[in-house]
Image (tube, rainbow, N blue to C red):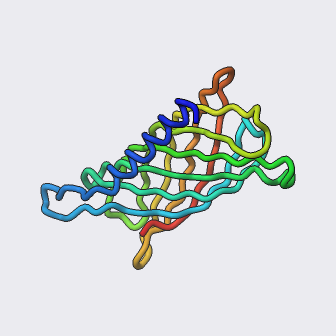
Amino acid sequence: MTLYKRLLLFVTLFGMGWMLSPAHEATAQQPLRPRFGLGFNTTLTTAEGVLGLGLRARTSAPVNTDLSFAVDLGVTGFILRGRDDATYVFDPQLSAIVTLNAGQQRTPYILGGIGAYVPFGGDDEEESGPTLHGGFGWVQALSNTTLFYEIDPALIIGETAVDLVLPFRIGVIF
């Protein structure tokens, strides 16, 4: 395992442990609990040149009602050219999420942070590397859960090139 992959694994596991630790109570004495989300994504990328389909999981820990930190784990498959030419991508992210107009039925938010783009299976010549991402989304309150949808573009900083990833995500927050 290369040093880069070991560092990525360490940061991901450390971030997940930190995110799962209990949050402190806000000044208004309202308990702020971690939130968990599961969703689907479609991804367009200049690195693969095709549309990818994937799954994503997110854990977020609120600092206060406006700011949260999150750890995302996602896997996207670029499978539309068939199984023989398919490439899969593991793309974890660490994010800061700022909620705008908290408490509304439909609430916008912005997010940004760092991550990684690690292709596996298929072509061994695919660029991997760290990512910088920033995007926006909305949460829609339902009865017991919350629906989210977002666009979160990222730059893949490879050894020889910089590529763009444009995912659209939709899912449920528990």
Residue at (60%, 27%) from the top-left corner? 157
Residue 38, position as x, y percentages in the image = 52, 64
Q: Is 132 above or below relative to 81?
A: above
Q: Nearer the viewer, residue 1 or 46?
A: 1
Residue at (58%, 36%) from the top-left corner? 1
Position of residue 34 in the picture relative to residue 161 (left or right) = left
Q: Is 7 above or below relative to 65?
A: above
Residue at (67%, 54%) from the top-left corner? 42
Residue 90, position as x, y percentages in the image = 61, 47
Q: Is 7 above or below relative to 171?
A: above
Residue at (43%, 73%) from the top-left corner? 145
Residue 162, position as x, y percentages in the image = 65, 26
Position of residue 51 in the picture relative to residue 12 (left or right) = right
Residue 43, position as x, y percentages in the image = 68, 49
The tally of labels here is: 0
Looking at the rendered image, the quarter that the C terminus falls into is bottom left
Q: Is 31 above or below relative to 130?
A: below
Q: Nearer the viewer, residue 122 or 41?
A: 122
Position of residue 32 in the picture relative to residue 124 (left or right) = left
Residue sitting at the far top: 160
Residue sitting at the far front: 1
